């Protein structure tokens, strides 16, 4: 995401500043020698270049209206109807002003587009989109959450990926009490048996499961991957090509990942 790009920019500046400080403060007169590896002019050049790259990539979605964001998503072939946009905007307007600074408006809209609903009577997930799936990372370790995760992926799989026969290892009383444990998840992806040992940390979803699925897709010769972004405790997932993921990042300023950085 854009924040990560800014973080990298800040880290670059900090590292250059530290290097300059060591040269001038720790080496004394030696730092004034003509062959110094870093000079103040070098520091300024690096800072200007990185800052310019940051500005070129920066997309200020916080200043956009919800209608403008809806149009950007629509141009990316993500269907967002007026009712969904209105729900997202009404909820946004009720957020605490201090909280808004930490919420990405694009991710906020997408959470309404792709969250779907769970039918408690039928015990089934009802998707709200076949283009994007969104779920809560903080409540992603229960049986229902994990089973719904695969249902959500099936919904956005464009008929090219199919998850079936999901089996979750039961959780012992001791593991429930500790909150930190491994849990085996078995499933089939396009008919291929898969097994993953999820690292459960209380109620948090193990996003490395997405990385594992992508490794299976690669082995199966699929050019698409599961790309995702995290916004607070929400995880927004797409099944798409690398080219589309790059288009999404360029238009929204939100960087998508296939694995944890």
Image (cartoon, rainbow, N blue to C red):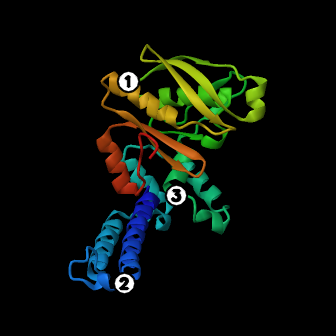
Observer able to see residue 139: yes
Contact flag, marks 2 and 3 (Cβ < 8 Å):
no
Between disc 1 and disc 2, the foreground one is: 2
> Measured from the top left, where is residue 104 in percent x and y?
52, 57
Q: Pointer 3: what residue?
A: 105
Q: Earlier in the sequence, mark 1 or mark 3?
A: 3
Q: Nearer the viewer, residue 229 or 23?
A: 23
Q: Secondary structure at mark 2?
A: helix
Give above or below for 31 relative to 141. Answer: below
Which residue is nearer to you in this view: 104 or 54?
54
**Residue at (68% x, 21% y) in the render:** 122
Q: CA distance from mark 2 to mark 3?
A: 50 Å
Could you tell whether 84 is left or right of 22 in the image?
Answer: right
Residue drawn at the location 28% of the way across and 80% of the way down: 39
Q: Is residue 169 left or right of residue 230?
A: right
Q: Locate residue 204: give its quadrant.
A: top right
Q: How many neighbours does mark 2 have within 10 angstroms: few (below 14), some (14-19), or many (20 or more)?
A: few
- Mark number displayed over residue 193: none
Q: Which quadrant: the N terminus?
A: bottom left
Callout 1: SS? loop
Horizontal and vertical percent for residue 134? 54, 40
Q: Earlier in the sequence, mark 2 or mark 3?
A: 2
Closer-to-camera residue (185/81)? 185
Q: Report the residue at 71% width, 23% height from top.
A: 171
Name the residue carrying label 1: 160
Write down the residue under mark 2.
28
Q: Answer yes or no: do the residues labelled 1 and 3 have beta carbons within 8 Å?
A: no
* Mark earlier in primary sequence (1, 2): 2
């Amino acid at each position: 995401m854009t924040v990560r790009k800014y973080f990298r920019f800040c880290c670059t500046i900090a590292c250059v500043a530290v290097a300059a400080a060591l040269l001038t403060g720790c080496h004394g007169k030696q730092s004034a020698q003509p062959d110094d590896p870093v000079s103040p002019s070098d520091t300024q050049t690096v800072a200007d270049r990185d800052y310019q790259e940051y500005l070129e990539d920066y997309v200020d979605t916080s200043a956009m209206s919800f209608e403008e964001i809806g149009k950007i998503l629509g141009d990316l072939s993500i269907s967002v109807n007026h009712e969904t946009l209105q729900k997202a905007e009404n909820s946004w307007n009720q957020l605490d002003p201090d909280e808004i600074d930490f919420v990405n408006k694009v991710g906020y809209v997408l959470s309404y587009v792709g969250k779907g609903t769970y039918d408690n009577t039928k015990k089934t997930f009802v998707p709200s989109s076949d283009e994007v799936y969104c779920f809560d990372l903080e409540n992603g370790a229960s049986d229902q959450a994990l089973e719904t995760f695969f249902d959500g992926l099936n919904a956005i799989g464009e008929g090219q990926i199919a998850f079936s026969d999901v089996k979750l290892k039961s959780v012992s009383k001791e593991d429930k009490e500790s909150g930190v444990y491994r849990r085996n998840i078995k499933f089939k992806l396009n008919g291929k048996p898969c097994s993953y040992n999820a690292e459960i940390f209380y109620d948090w979803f193990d996003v490395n499961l997405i990385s594992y699925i992508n490794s299976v897709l690669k082995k199966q010769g699929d050019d698409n991957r599961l790309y995702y972004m995290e916004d607070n405790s929400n995880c927004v997932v797409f099944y798409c090509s690398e080219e589309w993921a790059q288009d999404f990042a360029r238009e929204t300023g939100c960087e998508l990942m296939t694995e944890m950085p």
